[in-house]
Image (cartoon, helix red, strand yellow):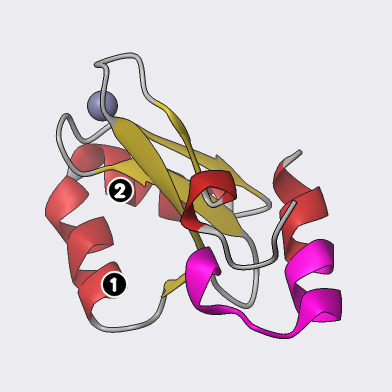
Amino acid sequence: MVIGDESICTEDCECGSKQYFYYCNQGMIAVCFKCGRFESSDLPTNLVDIFLEDPTILMSLIKGDYFKALSDITDPDRWISLYTRIN
Ligand SMILES: [Zn+2]
């Protein structure tokens, strides 16, 4: 396992594409940009409801860097602590 390797920062999506992992202060999210499916962990339920209602909000938060890409993390300790949240 190589820290920061993109292959371990993604998982297969039901649509055949990939879901990419993002993190924020409160939790994690895995999102597929092809079909829009996402899975979250440790996020407030009402926030997840908002994403389900309007997926463009989630996209805006990713573009606005509220959610950051797991693959961008270079500190191994930080990476492991985030990675274990979702596995
Ligand atoms: Zn998909």
- The vertical placement of 87 against 85, above or below, is above
Q: Secondary structure at mark 2?
A: helix
Residue 69 position within the rendered picture, expressed as x and y whole percent measured from the top left: 45, 69
Q: Residue at x 60, y 79 (%)?
A: 73
Residue 31 position within the rendered picture, expressed as x and y whole percent measured from the top left: 36, 44
Ligand 1: which quarter?
Answer: top left
Of the image marks 2 and 1, the number of the one nearer the N terminus: 2
Q: Which segment is the magenta one?
A: 70-81
What mark, if any, has residue 46 been given in the picture?
A: none
| Dot 2 and dot 1 residues touching (CB under 8 Å) | no
Q: Nearer the viewer, residue 27 or 73?
A: 73
Q: Secondary structure at mark 1?
A: helix
Q: Residue at x 31, y 50 (%)?
A: 50
Residue 1 falls inside the magenta stretch: no
What mark, if any, has residue 61 been given in the picture?
A: 1
Q: Residue at x 22, y 40 (%)?
A: 53
In the rendered structure, the answer to whether residue 2 lies left or right of residue 60 reads: right
Q: CA distance from mark 2 to mark 1?
A: 10 Å
Crowdedness of circle 2 by 10 Å Cα count: few (<14), some, many (20+)? some
Q: Nearer the viewer, residue 34 or 38?
A: 34
What mark, if any, has residue 51 been given in the picture?
A: 2
Dominant secondary structure of the residues highlighted in magenta in the image: helix
In the rendered structure, the answer to whether residue 57 lies left or right of residue 3 reads: left
